Each structure stands twice: as structure tokens, then as C-alpha cells.
Image (spheres, grey):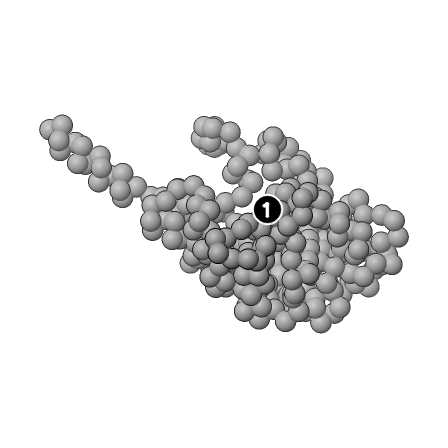
Amino acid sequence: MAFSAAILYAAAAVSAPHDNFNATLWYQTSAEFRANSLQTYKMASLTLKEALTDKNWTALPGQTSDFQQLPPAIIVDIDETILDNSPAAAQAILEQDTGFNGKRWDNWVAAAKAKAVPGAVDFLNLAGKNGVTVLYISNRECAPRAKVKDGCPQKTDTLKNLQATGITQVDASQLWLKSEQKDWTSEKESRRLKAAQQYRVIMLVGDDFGDFLPQVKSNITPAKRFELVDQYQQYWGSRWFMLTNPTYGSWETILQQPKQQYLQGF
């Protein structure tokens, strides 16, 4: 009996769903995901003309110092905002690998074959046609690779991938990756502040709360994040555009164990 129980337990463990299974399945197969993304980028596109016409329009709450005279720019995240990396998540599930695997991720970045999130390319090309600079502020990290002299091969790969999706106006100067400069950490505020010195930032687009505000990715409660969402209500859907990403993000990493404590039943 003990032997049989051990076999049954092992079989159950092998067939147990991966923690990211449903989220990745939804991301890759649901019409709802596609509709949500198209809806988000359509709203951003419809708002673009007003944002360009109104010289007092800025997406950065603290942007001051005659920003009205600066050229317009849009800040976008890359992963799950412009590029769909769900194949990398799916591969981890198929291999029953939990947690972040840096080697797998870097191999995926190097392959430069991520497809675009629905609606993203048309929006970015519209912005380019209207003279708007798009800044890609990403936490893809510059890191050395064996036998590669490039100081940031991830930047080279990412640029290649973005161009392959059909984005017509993008070059290396527009990609600001994590660790590319000393103070460019996973907290993106330093890069947003740099952008504010050079541009009138008219929109922010991302899939994580940290793509919009600082100090929201650690040492904070879900309730406090809700308060901040409400505090900036006037920005959502006009200056700030959030893509849906249930597969990973600070929404999960801010939660304390056991995570069941956050579930609210009836």
C-alpha cells in the first residue's frame, strides 16, 4: 500500500498544473486578451491628436520647467506591452520549470522572434508619423554573454526584434535598458526623469504599475496601490494606458506569503 501511495503521489505531482498555466493559456488563446489590447491601443491612438495639440498636456505629474517647449515623446515598456513573450512562459510550463530562469530568458531575447502585442505596431507607427519620439524604457537587462564583445547584446537583439514586428521608426537611441547606465535599475523613475528633461512626455504605456509611478513594486500593500490608482484617475485612459498581464509582475511580487490570505470569499 505504501508503494502504491508513493506512485500515486508522484503521478499527481507530475500532472499538477504549473503555477502560471492558466494565466499563460489565457494570454495565448483568449479573444478577451486580444480585444483588450486592441481597445487600449485604439484609445491611445484616438487621444494622440489632442495630446499633441494641447501644449500643456503631459503624462508626468511632476513635469515642470517649460516642458511646453519640448518635443513630444511617448514612453512605453517593451515586454507584454509591445512584445509578446508568452512563448518563453509557455516553454517554462512545458518543462515544468518554476521561477525565473535567466538563461532561458536570455536565449529567448537573443532569438529576437517575439511577436507584437495586438495593436501596438499600428499605434507606434502612428506616433512616429506624427513626429512623436517613442522611448522604450525596459527592464530587459544589459548583461555580458560569453564570446560576445557587444557591451549590451540584449539591446541589439531587442532592436532587431522591434524592427521585425514592423515598427518603422526605432533605433538604438530610443531603447533605455536596465543597467545600461549606473542608476538605471528596475525602478524606472530615473529614466522617466531623464526623459522629462528632453521631452514633453504625452503618454505612458505599460503592463505594470511600476511603468507609471515610482515606489510601487515593493514594500507596499495592494490597498495602497488601489489608493494610488484612484488618486490618478484622470490619467488612466488619456495619458496612461495599461495592458493586461496576469502572467507576472509587481502585482504578485508585492504579496506576502501565504498568498491565500489575499483571497476574499463571500
> How many numbered marks have been drawn onto this rendered protein structure?
1
Q: Is 107 or 95 nearer to us in this picture?
A: 107
Residue 36 visible (yes or no): no
Residue shown at the point (30%, 41%) measured from the top left: 16
Residue shown at the point (54%, 61%) measured from the top left: 157
Residue type, numbered disc 1: Asp
Residue shown at the point (68%, 40%) measured from the top left: 214
Q: Position of residue 39 (x, y in %)?
A: 59, 60
175 relative to 90 in the view: left or right: right
| Mark 1, secondary structure of its residue | loop
87 relative to 123 in the view: left or right: left
Position of residue 100 relative to residue 145, above or below, is: above
Q: Position of residue 55 (x, y in %)?
A: 85, 59
Residue 105 visible (yes or no): yes
Q: Quadrant of the N terminus?
A: top left
Q: Is 62 or 95 nearer to us in this picture?
A: 95
Q: Position of residue 9 (x, y in %)?
A: 22, 34
Position of residue 240 relative to residue 52, above or below, is: above
116 relative to 73 in the view: left or right: left
Question: Which quadrant of the figure has residue 224?
Answer: top right
Give the labeled residue for mark 1.
208
